[in-house]
Amino acid sequence: MMIPFNVIVPVRNEEVQLQSTAPALKASLTGLPVTVTYVLNATTDASRAVIESVFGHTACIIELPHAGKANALRAADASVRGNLIVYLDADIVVTKDTFPALLHPLIEGHADFVAARLVVDLSQSLGFALRVGRVWGDQLARRPDAFMCCTAINENGLKQRGPWPDVLADDDWARNRIDPSRRMIIEAAKAYMTPPLNLLSWVKVRARWICGTRQLKNMGENFNPGEKIMPRGSVIDLAAYYIVRLSAELLALIWQHRQSYWSRDNSSRRKNCV
């Protein structure tokens, strides 16, 4: 039996993405005992209008004056009732089967922290971005530690995790705080993501991941880079993948040297690379 749960969605200038993800989220929750909380942090576009057009007054909307995903997550955690929480990125598409499958192990006590199996939607990708996406999507599908974008946690997991710190790689930090024997990727729970659509965006995204990983490593607390899954694909696909990867390493070093801000859209995570 499904028990009441919360879905928390941090938002920073996600107007375009929300036009597809918000209706999908609402449809996926039909008949479920859920409270949806969108946290808008320093949003300047029409994200709120899109959310309200879809959910009306059935979703809680919190507006924060300053950008910062960790701050948004802390504010949402403080506002919700109950200890069964889903954290969902604003650009992720879910289906009606996602949440029952995702939450079942938490409700039954088989796990304290779970994640949906991410599926990379390459339908909009072209050229070399498509080649990079194929390699990365294949890696992601084989990773046993891909706790990201659509995760859920119960009361025991919240006690292990603790409050959100100001880190870049919040998903990895949360994963590393949970006992490995109490966390699971739920293959039956699918969540769909659109990868970067050009090489420059790919380089920037990977550079941010590198900065986040280095920050966790420098923090030292329960740092775990996760299991290494080797890329595979055609020669041309792998060439495109490694060009992006090496370029991202260089960009991450530049960002660290300049202590520059980073964000896909100058939005939710404006933190210095550490």
Image (cartoon, rainbow, N blue to C red):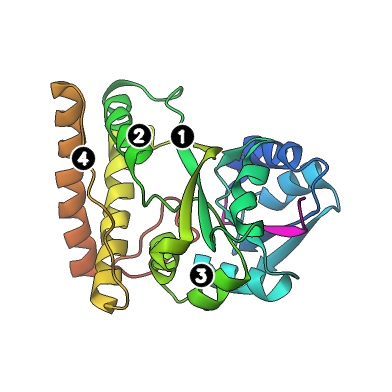
| Of marks 1 and 4, the one in the foreground | 1
The magenta segment is: 1-13
Q: Quadrant of residue 77?
A: bottom right
For label 3, the residue is 70
The CA span between labels 3 and 2 is 26 Å
Would you call the spot at circle 1 few (<14 residues within 10 Å), some (14-19), or many (20 or more)? Answer: some
Closer to the camera in the image, 91 or 2? 2
Q: Nearer the viewer, residue 135 or 116?
A: 116
Could you tell me which residue is drawn at 21 percent across and 36 percent down?
A: 231
Q: Is residue 155 above or below residue 143?
A: below
Element marked by disc 4: helix
Q: Which residue is mark 4?
A: 244
Q: Secondary structure at mark 2?
A: helix
Q: Which residue is mark 1?
A: 119
Q: Position of residue 48 (x, y in %)?
A: 71, 52
The amino acid at mark 4 is Val
Q: Position of residue 44 (x, y in %)?
A: 61, 56
Is residue 163 in sight in this rendering?
no
Amino acid type assigned to the residue bearing label 2 in the image: Gly
Horizontal side of residue 21 vs 111, given as left or right: right
Going 69% across and 42% down the picture, which residue do you hit? 25
* Mark 1 or 3: the one toward you: 1
Secondary structure at numbered mark 3 = helix
Amino acid type for the residue under numbered disc 3? Ala
CA gap, disc 1 and disc 4: 21 Å
**Residue 212 coordinates in the image, percent (x, y):** 32, 63
C-alpha separation, residue under disc 2 versus residue under disc 4: 14 Å
